[in-house]
């Protein structure tokens, strides 16, 4: 975590909260196209277990919650515009 510039907090129950560094959501892929390179939807909606509650696994840097409607609209947009590439060596 130090190598990736993450910070973390140990909780009394033994769980560790990991805080990632701020990274750009839009990046330029190897083919030159801009891409939304982010796991916000997976983290916000899918990391649900005894430590993560739906909609609370991702927050702003000041620890305020994301707007649920905005994230759900983003998820719908991503689903409507998704594409798959065949991965090849090299």
Image (cartoon, rainbow, N blue to C red):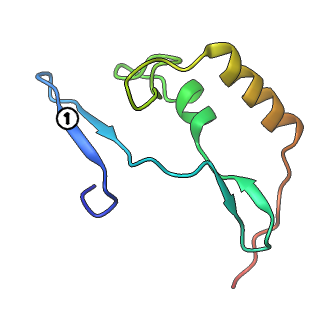
Left or right: 74 as drawn, with respect to 2: right
Direction bottom: furthest residue: 90
Q: Is residue 88 above or below residue 56?
A: below
Direction left: furthest residue: 12
Say which residue appears at 62% left-offset and 15% top-offset.
Answer: 68
| Quadrant of the image containing the C terminus | bottom right
Count of numbered circles in the view: 1
Q: Is residue 21 above or below residue 67?
A: below
Q: Position of residue 54 (x, y in %)?
A: 52, 17
Left or right: 50 as drawn, with respect to 73: left
Q: Is residue 71 above or below residue 7?
A: above
Of the pair 22 and 40, the residue shown nearer to us? 22
Q: On the image, numbered disc 1 is attached to which residue? A: 9
Dot 1 crowding, Cα within 10 Å, few <14, some 14–19, many 20+ = few
Say which residue appears at 84% left-offset and 45% top-offset.
Answer: 82
Left or right: 85 as drawn, with respect to 29: right
Of the pair 63 and 30, the residue shown nearer to us? 63
The image quarter containing residue 71 is top right
Say which residue appears at 77% left-offset and 59% top-offset.
Answer: 34
Say which residue appears at 70% left-offset and 65% top-offset.
Answer: 28
Of the pair 70 and 16, the residue shown nearer to us? 70
Q: Position of residue 81 (x, y in %)?
A: 87, 42
The image quarter containing residue 44 is top right
Q: Position of residue 1 (x, y in %)?
A: 28, 55
Instruction: Report helix, strand or loop for mark 1.
Output: strand
Direction front: furthest residue: 62
Q: Position of residue 76 (x, y in %)?
A: 80, 27
């Amino acid at each position: 975590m130090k190598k990736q510039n993450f910070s973390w907090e140990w909780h009394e129950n033994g769980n560790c909260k990991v805080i990632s560094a701020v990274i750009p959501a839009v990046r330029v892929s190897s083919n030159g196209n801009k891409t939304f390179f982010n796991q916000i939807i997976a983290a916000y909606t899918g990391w649900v277990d005894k430590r993560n509650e739906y909609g609370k696994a991702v927050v702003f840097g000041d620890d305020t919650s994301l707007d649920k409607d905005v994230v759900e609209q983003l998820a719908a947009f991503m689903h409507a515009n998704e594409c798959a590439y065949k991965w090849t060596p090299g």
